[in-house]
Amino acid sequence: DIASLTQLPDTVVTEDLSPSFVGGPFQVPPGAILLDTEEDIVFKGIDQAFRYIRLESGSISYSVESSTNGYVELHYGFPSVTIGGQEVNLDVLLPPAVSGVIQSETGTIDLTGAEIDLTGVSGTEINRIASQLTIGTPAYLPDTAQVYGDDSISVSMHFQDMMVRQVAGYFGEELVDLNVEQTVFDPEIFLGGFIDVSPSRARLEFQNTIGADLRLTLDALSVDGIALDHPAFGVPQLISRADWQGDAVVPAIWEMDLLQTGPSFFELLGYLPQSVTVLGSATLNPLGDVSGGNDFFDAQVPPELVLDLEWPLNTQIEHLRLRQVRDIDPISLPDFNGDLVLEVTNGFPVHWGLEWVWTFDNTSLEPLFFAAESPPFLSDMTEDVPVEYRIPISSEMLLSGGQLEITGSMQTDGAVVFSGNERIRLQVRVEGVHEVVIE
């Protein structure tokens, strides 16, 4: 996540209008213009030079106050901010303030999906929104405002929580630390075992989807804390910018051959590690502003590290154990007489050892245990054939609910040919009859 490109700092803009005289009252007729100004709203705290953004979300909280004894009409226009092609404007009409009671209006303008030109009033600036503020008395109301020297009209605009989807401009030489940890095998699901993974092709790809050059340096790669070595570690790699000229991005790709790691990355992967960690850094625009301020970034298409593998489908598996846990909601079925039905469809060219344990929320009930072998794999069948196992259960068990833990174990006798589309399907249901009393 490149935070400096995906979120704009909150910005508050205030305008105060006070008469330039003492005493009063001074009569202001209908249709009079008290203030008409065109100026830039500057977003401070931005190190980059942005020219355009499209917001994922954001809002403007506004507050308008008047102590003037007369109707006040305010128009705050943002010609450089559009939503669905429509300009964002704020129009407020405040009634006369009498007996020292200040009239006010507050509200929020939703900026979700807004497109913002940040080149300001001149069209050549950066990080600026063009705005036009007009304050006066409404021409359509026959009311003459009575203005005193101590009257005031104030406007406050708070641009907040502005999350960016797309941004264009010059991003500067931004340094980004890489600390990517990817879960590979969830230890709650993969309980143990070994898979012989011997790929014929194995690449770690970095896909640069930013419209800016990158200098990438990978410093370390580890598998469950075991460090690996590779000739590319510590060597800066210059990656060109992505192509955003069409409707879809064409990323620039840098590759690292994982078959050159020591110790073998895939021998470690075969032991079902929990995580793989990559450490390094990346620098945006290491050569400076070579695009003339035309960098581009879409937060929905971030840069990625991708593992690209190709290995023979002749694979050996040793003592592989997997677990799934499912909650069972309590069911009230008086005098139930039936079974818990476990339906298994085996799409693997090996047998699975299967165990089910139903642990009840009612601790007075002993856990229900069942073990079986999966049905044989029928490679000559056009469709996998399910096999049912039935376990008698009672109303008390159903009313208790609890957790059903399913554990599968598998081992091949040497290498086995896999298609890559294998699956084992487990379905659990309740079948039987129960007493229904109709009064």
Image (tube, rainbow, N blue to C red):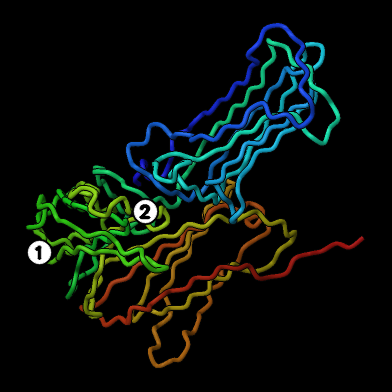
Relative depth, front residue between 259 and 116: 116
Amino acid type assigned to the residue bearing label 1 in the image:
Gln
Left or right, 401 with respect to 324, comes to right
Please rate how many residues cluster around mark 1, counting C-alpha atoms within 10 Å: few if below 14, some from 14 to 19, many from 20.
Answer: some
Relative depth, front residue between 216 and 395: 216
Q: Quadrant of the C terminus?
A: bottom right
State the separation of the CA atoms marked 2 and 1.
33 Å
Q: Position of residue 62 (x, y in %)?
A: 62, 31
Residue 282 visible in rendering: no
Q: Earlier in the sequence, mark 2 or mark 1?
A: 1
* Residue ID at (31%, 50%): 293
Residue 173 to residue 433: above or below: above
The residue to which callout 1 is attached is 260
Residue 405 visible in rendering: yes
The residue to which callout 2 is attached is 297
Q: Residue furthest left?
A: 231
Relative depth, front residue between 358 and 187: 187
Left or right, 117 with respect to 172, comes to right
Q: Which of labels 2 and 1 is toward the front?
A: 2
Amino acid type assigned to the residue bearing label 2 in the image:
Phe
* Residue ID at (41%, 40%): 127
Q: Position of residue 110 (x, y in %)?
A: 61, 43
